[in-house]
Amino acid sequence: MFDFMNIMNKVKEAQAKIKETQAKLVHLTAEGEAGAGMVKVFVNGERRVISIHMDDSLINLADKEMLRDLTVAATNKAFEAIDVKIKEEMKSATEGMMPNIPGMDLGNMF
């Protein structure tokens, strides 16, 4: 039988570690690029865009639609990259803290 108090203590410990790690996510950054690096978008672990860099050759009103498309593509790639980093950070923060209960996969919790 499981030691219920031990499990509850582990859950509280994991919650504290998760909260601490979430506070650090603002410092985690990822980059997405499109158009062979002509548009770069940087996001943080709070899933917020922190900056956008565009090659000077793109600043042309005639290419406005292409610029929009490249910005969207780069932003989506940056968010995909930060999601991977967030998951890695959260996994490492809680690794070994929770008991291995068959049928209970906590790996996709974040």
Image (cartoon, helix red, strand yellow):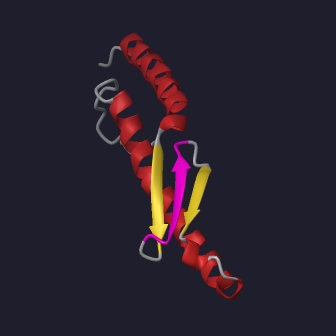
With 15 as the anchor, is 94 left or right in this view?
Answer: left
Residue at position x 68%, y 82% in the image: 64
Which residue occupies the foreground of this view, 21 or 58?
A: 58
Quarter of the figure that contains the N terminus:
top left
Q: Residue 46, located in which quarter of the rendered image?
A: top right
Q: Position of residue 59 (x, y in %)?
A: 64, 76
Residue at position x 52%, y 43% in the image: 45
40 drawn magenta: yes
Residue at position x 33%, y 23% in the image: 97
Which residue occupies the foreground of this view, 81 or 104?
A: 81
Which residue occupies the foreground of this view, 19 or 3?
A: 19
Residue 35 appears in view = yes
Q: Please, which residue is most extreme toward the top here?
A: 5
With 58 as the anchor, is 6 left or right in this view?
Answer: left
Which residue occupies the foreground of this view, 34 or 24?
A: 34
Q: Please, which residue is most extreme toward the front here?
A: 56
| On screen, residue 42 above or below 105 | below
| On screen, residue 8 above or below 62 | above
Q: Please, which residue is most extreme toward the bottom here?
A: 62
86 drawn magenta: no
Q: Position of residue 108 (x, y in %)?
A: 41, 46
Magenta segment main secondary structure: strand
Q: Position of residue 34 (x, y in %)?
A: 47, 72
Q: Position of residue 102 (x, y in %)?
A: 29, 38
Q: In the image, which residues are magenta?
A: 37-45
| On screen, residue 29 above or below 26 | below
> Looking at the image, how many numbered discs can be counted on the residues?
0
